[in-house]
Image: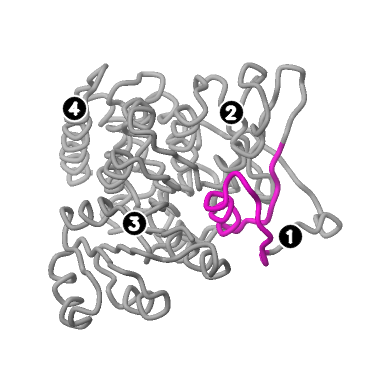
Amino acid sequence: MKNICILGSTGSIGRNSLEVIANFPDEFRVAYLSTNQNIDLLQKQIQRFGPRGVAVQDKSSAAALKRVTNGSLSVYAGEQGLEELIDRDDIDIVISSLVGFAGLKPTLQAIRRGKTIALANKETLVVAGEIITRMIKEHHATLIPVDSEHSAILQCLRGEDPASIAKLILTASGGPFLGLQKSEFSRVTVEAALRHPKWSMGNKISIDSATLMNKGLEVIEAHWLFHLPPDKIEVLIHPQSIIHSMVEFVDGSVKAQLGMPDMKIPIQYALTYPARAASVYGRVNFSDLKEMTFLKPDFTKFECLGLAYEAIKRGGTAPAVLNAANEIAVDLFLQERIGFDCIPGLIRESLQHVRITDTPSLDDIFEADRSAREFALGLGRRV
C-alpha cells in the first residue's frame, strides 16, 4: 500500500485524485491532505478518508480546524507546516496540485526528499524548469506529469528512442472564445470566460484556457519534461478534446493518445505508472463521434500563446515574469478591475520592463516573481 499526500486536496485536481484513490482501497492510502483555507470541504475529506495529518496554509483556518478536530489528527499550519508535512518519511507519492507559483516551494521540498511527485502544478516547471530538472537527478526524485496533454505525450513516448522524435503536438480545445472575434474580447464577462466547453476546472485555469495562456504554459512545461526546443513543440486546436496530444516521429508516423475529457484518467495513470489499471471511467465511442476537427491557433487573436513562446525562447527568468504577470492579470480580471482584452498587454509590458536574469538561481526566480507581480499590479491599477 502506497501512502499518498495531496497538496491542494480541495481543488479540482485534488478532488478528482481522491475519487481515483477511492477506487483502489488495497493499493493507495490517503495519508495527508492540504488546503489553503477551505476547511469545510477539508473536514468532509477527513471524515471520508481518515488521513494521518493535514496542512492548512491560512493560519487562522488551521487554528479553527485544530479546535474542531480536538487533537484527533495532526494539523500543520502555514508555509512552514506544509514543509513539515512533506518532510514526513511515510509519504510515497506527492500529488502536487496547488495552483500557480504557490506550488513551487512545496514541490521543491518534495524533490529534496526524493519523493515520487505526480505533478499537476505546471507553474513549477514554467518558472524553474532548469533548476527542477537538475534537482530531480541530484535527489533521485521521480516526476510524473498529470496534465492530460503531458500524460498523453508520456504514453506516446513509451518504448521510443528520443532521437526519433520529430515534434510534439499539444492539443487545445480552444476554450470558450474560439469562435469569437478579437474585437469582441473587450466585452467578455467573467462568467463567460469561466464557462469552459469541455473541462471542469478552477477559476484561474479556466481563464488561462480562455486566453490560451494555459497552452502556452504547457509548451514551456513540455520543453522541460521532454527536453525538446520550443520550435519542436506545436499547438493544435482540437475542439472535441478526444485526442489529448500527439508525437510525430522522424519517419512521418504519428502516435496519439485518445480518451474522454476526464482528468481522473491521467491522474490514475500517474499513480499506477508505468502499469495500467482497469477503471470505471467513460470510454470513447468512435461510432458516436460525428467529427474530429483541427485548427492552427490564431496567435494574433490569442496573444498569450505567443508571449509564452517568446518567454521560453528568451529563457532565464522570463518565464517566471510571464507567469507572475499572468497570475496578477487573471486575478484583476476575476475581480473585474481590468477587461479580458487587457490581460495580454499587461503581460507583454511586464516582460518588456521587468529585469530578466539569464542564468538564475532560486533566489533570482523568487525576486523575478516578486518584481513582476509588483509591476503588473501597478500597471493594472492604471488601466
Where is residue 255 drawn, in percent x and y?
Answer: 73, 34
Mark 2, mark 3: which one is toward the viewer? 3
In the picture, measured across the screen, residue 313 lies left or right of residue 110, that is right
* Viewer-closest of 146 and 211: 146
Secondary structure beneath label 3: loop
Q: Pointer 2: residues within 10 angstroms few (<14), some, or many (20+)?
A: some
Mark 4, mark 2: which one is toward the viewer? 4
Q: Earlier in the sequence, mark 3 or mark 4?
A: 3
Above or below, 60 against 163 in this view is below
What residue sits 50% from the left and 19% below the top? Answer: 229
Pointer 2 and pointer 3: residues touching (CB < 8 Å)? no
Q: Earlier in the sequence, mark 4 or mark 2?
A: 2
What is the three-letter code of the residue carrying label 2?
Glu
Say which residue label 3 marks: 90
Say which residue label 1 marks: 283
Q: Rounded to the nearest whole Å, what is the CA distance between mark 3 and mark 1? A: 35 Å
Q: Quadrant of residue 361?
A: top left
Q: Rounded to the nearest whole Å, what is the CA distance between mark 2 and mark 3? A: 40 Å
Q: Rounded to the nearest whole Å, what is the CA distance between mark 3 and mark 4? A: 33 Å
What is the three-letter code of the residue carrying label 3?
Asp
Q: How many marks?
A: 4
Q: Earlier in the sequence, mark 2 or mark 1?
A: 2
Say which residue label 4 marks: 364
The reply to whether the magenta stretch includes residue 116 is: no
Q: Pointer 3: residues within 10 angstroms few (<14), some, or many (20+)?
A: some
What residue sits 37% from the left and 66% below the top? Answer: 10
Q: Pointer 4: residues within 10 angstroms few (<14), some, or many (20+)?
A: some
